[in-house]
């Protein structure tokens, strides 16, 4: 596409977020592969080494990616969807319930589920996703609720609704009341365990969403809506319909993910399924360059954001081996802050900004030292904890001194 | 040059932004107690210079002396402490706080137990506002005040800071004639107290009415500082643009065609439904004609255009006929389909997509023309954008440049370009030259004239009467939502229009 060096440079600077993420992903792989005592990522000999890791990353990335795409569209259109995790849980429950209602014997392990039942359950679940998204859009555009409130309500409500439905249905269909539905059918589970199916769905959706956002009129209008809703309305854009589309895509992608998750986990348990996943999706979009103010962000960026989040989580799991899943939230939190702060400082120009100038800066500095010490101690042990804390303290003290010196010099420059 | 030591001495100030030098080695003096006008086209560097003085921009090269001492501030608070206050063009008030709370924002008076003492603040604020001939309730939220009164609240705030240097950035851009007269009296009073005023403006009549010295900036460079008594508006304009602007004479014999828009008994009830923002407005517009809507702020100019474009708060009553077909618009989409286009008053808030490029801003309403098989074609969109940019003479580095990198006049042209791509019959322009400099204004006038020659009908509002007198074939006057006058070009005079605009007072 780019014939001259000039346009190549333009292209590079236009896609800085994406390129930065790509580099960061490679860096994480190399670092984690090197630090990991077993060098799992570089171990292609045994079947349990690299291949297994990559499959796991691919599975996790695809599942998160599917609904992160939906979240990204909502965010780009200037809204927010907090309900993903609950929609996943609710959709999973609905899917399992539908199968139980249509084929009770098969669901209790008696026989195979027929393909017709599986297909009907999937279609029904996706339809439920469409209804949820439409409800969001109606609450936001017609009733006038802020997106935060509308989707917060479903975040809280749908999970408990899913559980109630499962309790009632298991009570009626099975021997006793249960809060979850087991899934034994291998053909249904293959949807998730095959790995290539989730990956394919993610890839196809990513391409479709990318086409929608970057190559269609509707997509351009979504950016316009997110960038300046009033101006979009005055430009003759039907903002109500666009929001309907955005929230529907948000909910339907979550529903698809819900179907895959119950296949993956062999159980539909609305109490635990997808808990907190909405924040992972939002984090992936934000790390990938979407602005929560709306109007900014890309699908390639979001895809890379998802991959980056999952590789970091997996990389740290490789390094500390046991109990790494405890740290997932911590890692996501840190990555979001670091990625967005990096962008913020780059665009705002950190120049002579003083980070630790006043009381607030000093308290924050102390917090950072404690945090570093804690993280090092928890992940690596007593001695690394002390070392980590000391290093952080030293770094902040040095920064503070440098800032103070620069500020003094600035003042004396002005006086001269 | 003033002989006494200047109160502000600007020495070689340079400010570079990525890709553009906003100020280039600017040096001049401001004498204590004078009113010093800073003029220049948009993008000349006036606002940057004022932001440096007010402490909004803190990184720059060069030096500023205030009362002979080096002046380096880390923020607006420092500047205020040094006695420098700025009244921004886009006012800086917290809409939902009262006038008094805004005046004392950040310096709230406290009473017993350290609680906020509203009564004393309201009292002092009332006195300050009274001095400025601003008779509003200091405890009412500023959201409910007129723009002119809001501006006086800002001035009152500056006074309460005991500022002796006041920077006013295009203070009259949104004021009615009566409010401008009041502002003139306020300025005179401030000068009696010895306040030094830096006054940024595009308007030659104001500059020559008020200023002692005039400093002209162009492309970030200081062109000259002149004594008012030794110069003429013509010379200043010449220095600003770098070329002489012929006094805009617009063709008065445009071919007038068939009726394209007819409005009959249009009424717009308020949200509560008990009063009317517009009442029984009837008029018609023909091809090739420019009809102006005059009126004070709040007379219903904007509301009238909003009704015509299907974006009024409530549905209007009465009939709107476009090219012979009766229409009832509930969404701008329908108005656009019927051949209407509207450039709204507040460019930043209602027109621009700041995150988008110039090209994307221009093609937004006509993207359907750039699709192949349902997908946007980049080359087609580029052709569309380039054609529109060229047709309107938008000065830009290219269609991929950020829209925010353009000057106000060129942003306005880009928005006009966006609408012309929808091939409208009727163009509704709501105060299209607000915040646009002299040179660009003249260009916009010529553009509107050309579009009329091409067969468009234009409805235009303006807060500046001379503009309407220059442009319009007919001028309609609104007063509190009613039509109180209609003048042909031959009949229209400022006095007659003002009389109609204040008819019920």
Image: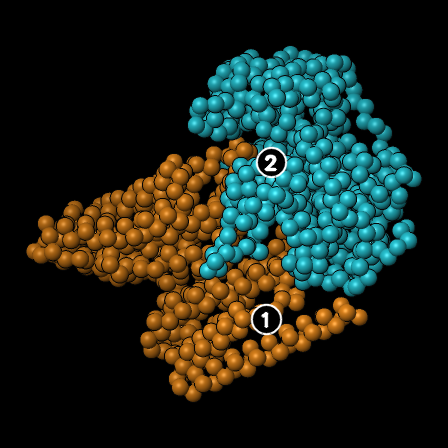
Chain colours: A orange, B cyan
Give the tally of numbered discs: 2
Residue at far left of view: A175
Q: x%, y% of residue B92?
A: 61, 47
Residue found 59% across the figure and 42% down from its top: B126
The image quadrant of residue A378 is: bottom left
Helix, strand or loop at disc 2? Answer: loop
Identify the element where label 1 is drawn: loop
Q: Nearer the viewer, residue B232 or A127?
A: B232
Marks 1 and 2 sit apart, C-alpha to C-alpha, by 44 Å
Tag 1 and tag 2 share a subunit: no
Across and down, in percent, residue A143 comes to 37, 37
Q: Is residue B36 left or right of residue B410?
A: right
Kindly identify which residue carries mark 2: B135
| Residue A15 appears anywhere in the view | yes
Residue A298 seen by the camera: no
Chain letter of the residue beneath label 2 in the structure image = B
Identify the residue position indicated by label 1 in the image: A357
Task: Give the camera-side residue of A394 and B156.
Answer: B156
Q: Which of B470/A311 is in front?
A: B470
Q: Quadrant of the C terminus of chain B?
A: top right
């Amino acid at each position: 596409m780019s014939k001259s060096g000039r346009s190549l440079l333009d292209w590079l600077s236009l896609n800085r977020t994406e390129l930065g993420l790509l580099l960061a992903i490679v860096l994480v792989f190399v670092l984690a592969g090197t630090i990991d005592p077993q060098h799992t990522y570089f171990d292609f000999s045994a079947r349990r080494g690299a291949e297994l890791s990559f499959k796991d990353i691919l599975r996790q990335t695809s599942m998160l990616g599917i609904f992160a795409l939906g979240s990204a569209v909502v965010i780009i259109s200037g809204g927010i969807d907090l309900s993903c995790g609950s929609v996943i849980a609710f959709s999973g429950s609905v899917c399992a319930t539908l199968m139980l209602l249509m084929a009770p014997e098969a669901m209790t392990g008696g026989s195979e589920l027929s393909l017709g039942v599986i297909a009907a359950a999937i279609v029904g679940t996706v339809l439920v996703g469409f209804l949820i998204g439409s409800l969001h859009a109606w609450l936001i555009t017609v009733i006038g609720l802020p997106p935060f409130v509308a989707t917060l309500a479903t975040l809280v409500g749908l999970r408990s609704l899913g559980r109630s439905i499962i309790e009632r249905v298991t009570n009626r269909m099975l021997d006793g009341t249960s809060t979850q539905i087991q899934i034994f059918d291998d053909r249904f589970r293959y949807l998730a365990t095959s790995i290539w199916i989730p990956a394919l769905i993610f890839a196809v959706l990513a391409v479709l969403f990318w086409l929608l956002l970057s190559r269609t009129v509707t997509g351009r209008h979504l950016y316009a809506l997110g960038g300046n809703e009033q101006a979009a309305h005055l430009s003759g854009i039907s903002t109500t319909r666009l929001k309907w589309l955005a929230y529907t895509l948000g909910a339907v992608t979550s529903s698809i993910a819900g179907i895959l998750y119950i296949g993956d986990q062999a159980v539909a348990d609305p109490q635990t399924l997808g808990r907190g996943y909405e924040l992972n999706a939002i984090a992936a979009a934000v790390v990938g360059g979407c602005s929560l103010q709306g109007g900014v962000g890309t699908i390639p960026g979001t895809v890379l954001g998802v991959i980056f989040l999952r590789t970091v989580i997996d990389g740290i799991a490789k390094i500390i081996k046991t109990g790494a899943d405890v740290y997932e939230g911590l890692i996501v939190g840190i990555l979001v802050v670091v990625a967005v702060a990096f962008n913020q400082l780059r665009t705002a120009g950190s120049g002579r900004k003083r980070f630790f100038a006043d009381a607030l800066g000093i308290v924050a500095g102390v917090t950072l030292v404690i945090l570093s010490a804690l993280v090092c101690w928890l992940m690596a042990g007593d001695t690394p904890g002390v070392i980590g804390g000391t290093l952080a303290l030293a770094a902040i003290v040095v920064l503070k001194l440098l800032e103070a010196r620069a500020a003094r010099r600035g003042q004396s420059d002005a006086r001269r | 040059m003033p002989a006494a030591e200047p109160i502000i001495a600007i020495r070689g100030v340079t400010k570079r932004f990525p890709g553009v030098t906003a100020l280039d080695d600017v040096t001049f003096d401001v004498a204590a107690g004078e009113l010093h006008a800073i003029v220049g086209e948009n993008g000349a560097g006036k606002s940057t210079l004022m932001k440096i003085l007010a402490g909004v921009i803190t990184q720059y090269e060069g030096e500023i002396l205030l009362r002979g001492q080096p002046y380096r501030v880390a923020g607006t608070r420092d500047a205020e402490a040094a006695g420098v206050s700025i009244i921004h063009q886009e006012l800086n008030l917290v809409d939902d706080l009262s006038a008094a709370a805004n005046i004392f924002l950040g310096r709230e008076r406290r009473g017993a137990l350290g609680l906020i003492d509203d009564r004393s603040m309201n009292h002092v604020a009332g006195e300050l506002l009274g001095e400025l001939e601003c008779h509003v309730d200091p405890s009412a939220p500023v959201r409910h005040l007129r723009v002119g009164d809001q501006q006086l609240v800002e001035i009152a705030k500056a006074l309460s800071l005991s500022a002796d240097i006041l920077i006013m950035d295009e203070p009259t851009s949104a004021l009615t004639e009566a409010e401008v007269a009041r502002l003139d009296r306020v300025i005179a009073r401030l000068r009696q107290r010895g306040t030094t005023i830096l006054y940024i403006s595009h308007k030659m009549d104001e500059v020559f009415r008020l200023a002692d010295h005039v400093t002209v900036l162009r492309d970030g460079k200081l062109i000259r500082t002149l004594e008012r008594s030794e110069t003429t508006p013509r010379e200043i304009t010449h220095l600003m643009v770098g070329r002489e602007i012929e006094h805009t004479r617009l063709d008065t014999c445009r071919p007038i065609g068939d009726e394209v828009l007819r409005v009959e008994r249009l009424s717009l009830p308020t949200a509560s439904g008990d009063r009317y923002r517009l009442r029984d407005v009837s008029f018609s517009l023909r091809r090739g004609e420019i009809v102006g809507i005059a009126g004070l702020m709040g007379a219903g100019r904007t509301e009238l255009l909003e009704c015509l474009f299907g974006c009024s708060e409530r549905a209007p009553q009465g009939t709107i006929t476009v090219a012979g077909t009766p229409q009832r618009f509930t969404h701008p989409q329908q108005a656009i389909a019927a051949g209407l286009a509207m450039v709204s008053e507040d460019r930043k808030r209602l027109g621009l997509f700041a995150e988008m490029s110039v090209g994307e801003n221009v093609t937004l309403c006509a993207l359907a023309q750039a699709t192949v098989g349902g997908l946007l074609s980049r080359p087609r969109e580029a052709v569309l954008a380039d054609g529109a940019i060229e047709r309107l003479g938008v000065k830009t580095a290219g269609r991929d440049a950020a829209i925010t990198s353009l000057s106000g006049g060129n942003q306005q042209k880009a928005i006009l370009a966006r609408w012309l791509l929808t091939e409208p019959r009727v163009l509704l322009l709501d105060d299209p030259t607000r915040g646009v400099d002299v040179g660009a204004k003249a260009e916009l006038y010529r553009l509107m004239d050309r579009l009329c020659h091409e067969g468009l009908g234009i409805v235009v509002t303006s807060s500046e009467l001379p503009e309407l007198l220059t442009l319009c074939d007919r001028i309609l006057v609104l007063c509190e939502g009613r039509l109180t006058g209609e003048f042909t070009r031959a009949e229209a005079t400022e006095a007659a229009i003002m009389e109609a605009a204040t008819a019920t007072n």
